[in-house]
Amino acid sequence: MSANREWSDLAERTEAAAMRRILDDQTPEVRDLLGMSTHAVGDGVHTVVVRDPMWGYWNKALGFCEPVTDDIVGAVADRCRDLAATVAALLVQPRVVLDDWSSITERHGLTPGTVMVKCFGPAEPRPVETDLRITRLTPEHAADFVRIMAVGFGFEQTPDADAMFAGEQFFDGDWATYGAWDGDALVGVARMLAVAETEAVALFGAATLPQGRNRGAQGALLDVRVREARDRGLRWASAETWLESTENQNPSQHNLRRAGLTEVHTRPNWVWRPE
């Protein structure tokens, strides 16, 4: 892992900005429907989706570049209880972990979950090969975007999922959504957000149907988003994925490496649940 503190902090801040925008850019109706809210906590952000269509994935506290204290963890836990969230995760980069972190996690009932790897680096286009056609998507493709995401991530395409992911705002402005096509069939999707405050593109929301896998879809979708980021004048690209092991390989991690991103640090999801 890189010891580049600047890149680690930029990666954390970019992801936190994207998480906040995913909720704040929703319509008031969707925010009310799903119980969405964002809150400052320490120097990071706490996002809450009470009716999360992805089992609590979007309930997170992250973006910390200063030490994460007992008071910060307590504030996250208290807010989750007040808002009736059933699960949440604190994502804490290694250098902001205090010496008494084990005592803090035990006191608040946090348990280690999936280990994630943060990837960051210059937004530089690279040659890619695919037999699929890559295009930018429009709101008319919103339902297909959610359908492919549901297959890729293993969640159910419910009205709540459609409400959260299919908004027109995710296809324009600071947002862009791309697709990979096999003829007339959409087989892969990916989303991006231009984060002006960190001069970076946040890369996420990538999934491919089985018939589109091992054909370069995600490498091409990474490249087209990096190219758009560069066209927008952004310097950096940021992404995260789960850390692979010998027993559990992760193609996304290899795709991010091939896209020129550096693995700047790892961090476990520290999972909170009500007593």
Image (cartoon, grey):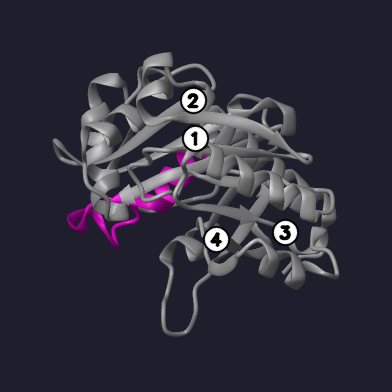
Q: Are marks 2 and 4 in contact (CB under 8 Å)?
A: no
Q: Nearer the viewer, mark 2 or mark 4?
A: 4
Circle 3: element type: loop
Mark 1 lies on residue: 192
Residue range highlighted in magenta:
208-225
Mark count: 4
- Which kind of residue does numbered mark 2 sit on? Trp
Circle 4: element type: strand
Q: Which mark is residue 93?
A: 3
- Which kind of residue does numbered mark 4 sit on? Val
Q: Position of residue 183 (x, y in %)?
A: 15, 40
**Label 2 CA crowd tier, 10 Å (few <14, some 14–19, many 20+):** some
Mark 2 lies on residue: 175
Left or right placement of residue 198 versus residue 153 in this view: right
Q: CA distance from mark 2 to mark 4?
A: 29 Å
State yes or no: residue 211 in magenta: yes
Q: Are marks 2 and 3 in contact (CB under 8 Å)?
A: no
Q: Nearer the viewer, residue 83 or 113?
A: 83
Q: Is residue 260 visible?
A: no
